[in-house]
Amino acid sequence: MDGTAQKRWDHELDLYRKARKEGIQPDGTTLNKVTEAMRLSDAAGAAYGRDFNKATPIEA
């Protein structure tokens, strides 16, 4: 048995932890859900989470 599946799982959980440290609350721990939450957060300029709405970014 190789460690590929374990490495992939560890990577997903590390990315999830990183997102949570940034205040982002993904809908799950899978790679797709975490990266989507991070992408939406970057696009909106606000942390994705329970009360997140897709909004236009605030211009400075």
Image: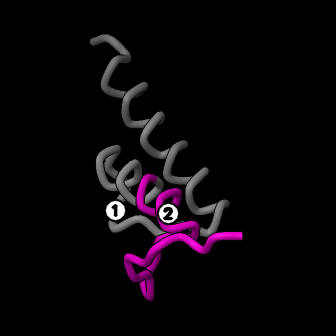
Element assignment for label 2: helix
Task: Read off the residue under disc 2.
Answer: 41
Where in the figure is residue 30, as x and y percent of width and height?
A: 32, 49
Picture quarter with the N terminus? top left
Residue occupying image coordinates x 34% and y 68%:
27
How many residues crowd mark 1 within 10 Å: few (<14), some (14–19), many (20+)?
few
Residue at 61% x, 50% y: name it.
18
State the extent of the magenta-drawn residues as a range.
39-60
Residue 55 drawn at (x, y percent): 43, 78
Label whose residue precedes the other's in the sequence (2 or 1): 1
Write down the residue under mark 1.
Answer: 28
In what quadrant of the picture does the C terminus appear?
bottom right
Instruction: Find the residue positioned furthest to the top.
Output: 2
Residue in the picture at 47% in, 34% down: 11
- Please state which of residues 5 and 21 is positioned toward the viewer in this rendering: 21
Residue lying farthest to the front in this orientation: 60
Quadrant hosting residue 31: top left
Q: Is residue 38 magenta?
A: no
14 vs 44, nearest the viewer: 44
Which amino acid is tagged 2? Ser
Tag nearer the camera, 2 or 1: 2
Determine the image quadrant of residue 7.
top left
Q: Residues within 10 Å of mark 2 (few under 14, many from 20)?
A: many
Q: Is residue 2 left or right of residue 42?
A: left
